[in-house]
Amino acid sequence: MLTRFSFTPALALASALASTLAFPSAPIPLKAMFIRRVLIFSLILITMLYLSALISVALVGGGLSWAGVLGCLMYVALTPWLALGFWSCVIGMLLLRFYKDPLLQVMPKELAKTAQSEIDAPLWSSTALLLCVRDEELTPIIHSLCAVLDDLVRTPHCGHFHMYILSDSTQAQKIAHEASAFEDLKLKYSKHLQITYRLRTEHSGFKAGNVMDFCRRFGDKHDFALTLDADSYMSPKAIIRLVRMMQSDSKLGILQGLVIAMPTLNAFTRLFQFGMRLGMRAWTLGNAWWQGDCGPYWGHNAVFRIAPFTEFCDLPLLSPSARRSRHILSHDQVEAVLMRRAGFDVRVLPFEDESWEQNPPNLPEFIRRDLRWCEGNLQYGSLLFLPNLRWVSRVQLLLAMLMFTGAPGWIGLIGLGTLVCAFPELANSINGAELMHLFWVTLVMFYVPKLVSALEIILDSKQRADFGGLFRFTGSFLLETCFSLLLSPIMWLSQTLFMAKLLFGMSKGWATQAREGQQISFAAAAAQFWPHTLLGAVCIGAIAWNQPGMIFFALFYTLGLLVSIPLTVFLSTPELGLWMHKVGIARLPEETTPPAELLALGLAACVIPPRQVLPSQNPS
């Protein structure tokens, strides 16, 4: 029976093969990487077939109906990304739990050795530090940049770096402010390292065009370039580590560092970042295990080799007849696959290493960034058949698209479930017991990665203390779980509505992101989320009226829609964020023991309220 199927055999297979494919004393053989990739895609395929069989038995096992067939098709469309996320995290957790040095399982020995070395080895290369800005508020950027440069000039390696501020600004007032501020910065550090401010007057290609313009104008002066966003920060130690790794491997074209979130006082961001932190390391490590030399590039907090990047990574234009923007918005993954096509490796360092970024301060800003990524990833459809790409690279582009194309399926299932409850005659072929089984299997696949990470933290005394102790961590985990349940349907509907607009030629383009928190008014929230509230009210009302026994299960997927307006307003309230920080809700390790680098930034969230100071940290 399908209901008795367990993932235990598949987990055992994954663990056994992961063990046989461990090569701690040599570079990972090509044959082993091929087997790993076959394994991960076999696990994904088996999981998809299992879920497809479950949904088929649940919806059409009692006979064919248009509602059952439609529901099956929509659910099957969701399974690739669901299965990939599940198995990537499972493999990552197996590596973290059963290998003393997981890094040796995802990159060559010499590269891993360089990554782990604390020896102050000399640099022989020249690296350009690239800070991309576009009509930004300069005060926090200058403050963050000075913190990086102040530490960098204290090292014996500062002469190997050259700072470039690459401006794509269009507002005259912003441009004038930039010119003055960065000229002052240049004078301040003139005795230690060079700083160049470049304003681009022709803004084609968005950020990718900005970086490529640098490569063509200045690239021949340097070996490597390290990219920073206006909201990202890296310590000199992390920067130098990536540069040393690039020096140690002439085949390495792009090296991505693992980026973690900066502590914040914004309530929405605290909850989102806390959840991301739980599964990020395992997810990244699991993906690195099968991606290997075809790794990811996220466009910032990463270093690339300038010569091949300039020659091979210039982005192709989309078809001139396309109704969307002709330039690619989500440039990073495309640059990664082009670098791999040229014969250079693309890898990720899957461990936290003093590399941070800010996340959007509220739900509207979070959605705005997400929809830009959505539009950019959907552009990959026209790139899937670029000549001479690695087959893994094509799969990566396809998976990046599937990250968003599942949203209409989720919304369709919510709508279909409501119709079935409103018109019981549509449910004649539905097997309720099998449907409940599928409900719980899907929910488990969503949350097992975070749950396993949470258990690992709870069982480790040091990690428990880093996250604020058992009570605070457990409470934060439960709260974040509820938060993600509410957030998911809001994102699904936002993505679905946006993709519908794209079909009619509407494009969101690239706009400057708001980085500072602000209170969202009820009117502003209502203007954006009234469709979500309407759909939520209709679904919950119809189910409560016709099938009250199903309301508990319906709330898992529809409550977030109903409460989207008050949730947006509530989570943007400054007082809520301050209270969460005060009592330690969604606390990150950087708040418990703030690194010196973040203290230099003066982040308010890194200051622990006096009554929360741990005994070991008490000056007395």
Image (cartoon, rainbow, N blue to C red):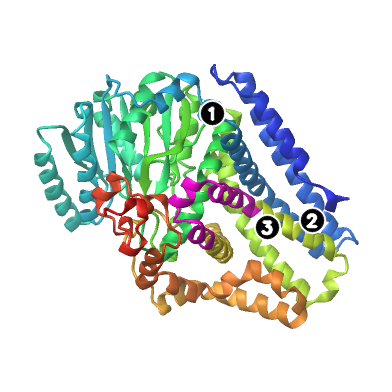
Q: Give the alpha-carbon distance from disc 3 to disc 2, as whole Å.
A: 14 Å
Give coordinates of residue 526: x percent, y percent. Answer: 46, 77
Residue for point 24% across, 24% down: 221
510 shown above or below 10: below
Q: Which residue is mark 3?
A: 443
Question: Could you tell me the amino acid type at mark 2?
Answer: Ile
471 shown above or below 423: above
Q: Give the alpha-carbon distance from disc 3 to disc 1, as whole Å.
A: 29 Å
Question: Could you tell me the amino acid type at mark 1?
Answer: Val
Give coordinates of residue 10: x percent, y percent. Answer: 75, 39
Mark identifier at residue 106: 1
Q: Which of the two marks, 3 or 2, is nearer to us in this view?
A: 3
Of helix, strand and loop, which one carries label 3? helix
In the image, the segment drawn in magenta is: 446-475
Q: Nearer the viewer, residue 75 or 488?
A: 488
Is disc 3 surrounded by few (<14), some (14 to 19) or many (20+) residues within 10 Å?
Answer: few
Q: Give the alpha-carbon distance from disc 1 to disc 2, as whole Å.
A: 35 Å
Give coordinates of residue 592: x percent, y percent. Answer: 38, 53
Residue for point 88% across, 69% down: 428
Of helix, strand and loop, which one carries label 2? helix
Q: Which residue is mark 2?
A: 55
